[in-house]
Image (spheres, rainbow, N blue to C red):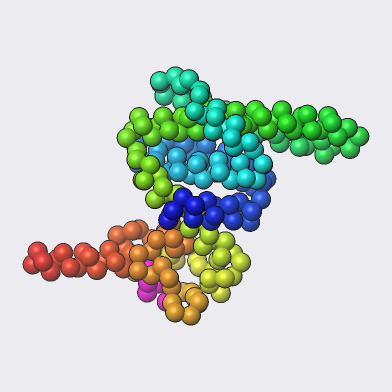
Amino acid sequence: MTDKEITELNLKSATYYGAQLQMNHFTEELAELIQAAAEGDPQHIAEEIADVEVMVEQMEYLLSLDTIYIESWATHILLANDIESCIWHLAAPIKSINKLRRVNLATAADPDMSKSEVQIKRQTANHDLETDIGELVSYLNWLAGRYSIAAEEIREIKSYKVQRTRDRIELETGSICKKVVDDKAAAQAQDLADYCKQQTECEPGGCIFATTGEGCILSDYVRPELWPDAIAKQQQEGHKNG
């Protein structure tokens, strides 16, 4: 997928779930990236960077943040070249998100607060978040460089993630399958395509994910080596070796 296609799917998901839920999701993804950075596993870090980049884009969209300021701040910030400083900056947006929540709660609880005061409080909270996200973006790039994670690798992960989210939304709204797949049974499935045929009633033409499993709602529960194309490849290699 192109960057534009990834963004289009991502913002549709953001609109579907809404700001409050995705603010929670953003802080969760930041926590997971902090853990990955502390562990120092490049593969885990790449996956969590992709997740956080997806959520940064959603926050910019849902909260109407100043993306020009964020990009400028990310470019000009002077980075400290150590993992401890990186982790501190990864955590900073969590505090800013909580500050924005408190502002929203305070203004909702005080209907007599003047519009100008409400505006000032929200602008201040938004600006703090924009600054922290700018620094966050800078450290995401720093992490990727430190662990030699290519931009294309992160793009591929993001592509997979936004497609999977799209498919979950379609499942929730009933546009892919007519009945919910049982997670426990999915974990025990040995063949994704056969499982889908037995357990779901998909749209005419069959499951569009049956060949590779990419983007399928079952991909969290069925190991990649059990996807049909992987099985076929293993069989072909077995014949050649035989």
Above or below, 222 relative to 81? below
Q: Quadrant of the C terminus?
A: bottom left
Q: Predominant secondary structure in magenta?
A: helix
Which residue is more in the foreground, 122 or 198? 122
Above or below, 56 relative to 128? below
Above or below, 169 relative to 4? below
Measuring 88% from the left and 32% from the top, which residue is drawn there? 114
Q: Quadrant of residue 99?
A: top right
Q: List x then y, in percent, for residue 168.
A: 53, 61
Q: List x then y, in percent, for residue 69.
A: 60, 31
Q: List x then y, in percent, for residue 232.
A: 24, 68
Above or below, 91 relative to 14? above
Measuring 35% from the left and 29% from the top, which residue is drawn there? 146
Residue furthest to the bottom:
204
Instruction: Give the side of residue 151 with respect to residue 59, left or right.
Output: left
Stretch in magenta: 192-198
Instruction: Give the side of residue 36 with respect to residue 20, left or right.
Output: left
Q: Is residue 194 magenta?
A: yes
Q: List x then y, in percent, for residue 138.
A: 48, 30
Does residue 198 appear in the picture of this structure?
Answer: no
Measuring 40% from the left and 44% from the top, which residue is drawn there? 154
Q: Quadrant of the N terminus?
A: bottom left
Measuring 58% from the left and 52% from the top, which residue is drawn there? 11
Q: Quadrant of residue 36?
A: top left
Q: Is residue 45 magenta?
A: no
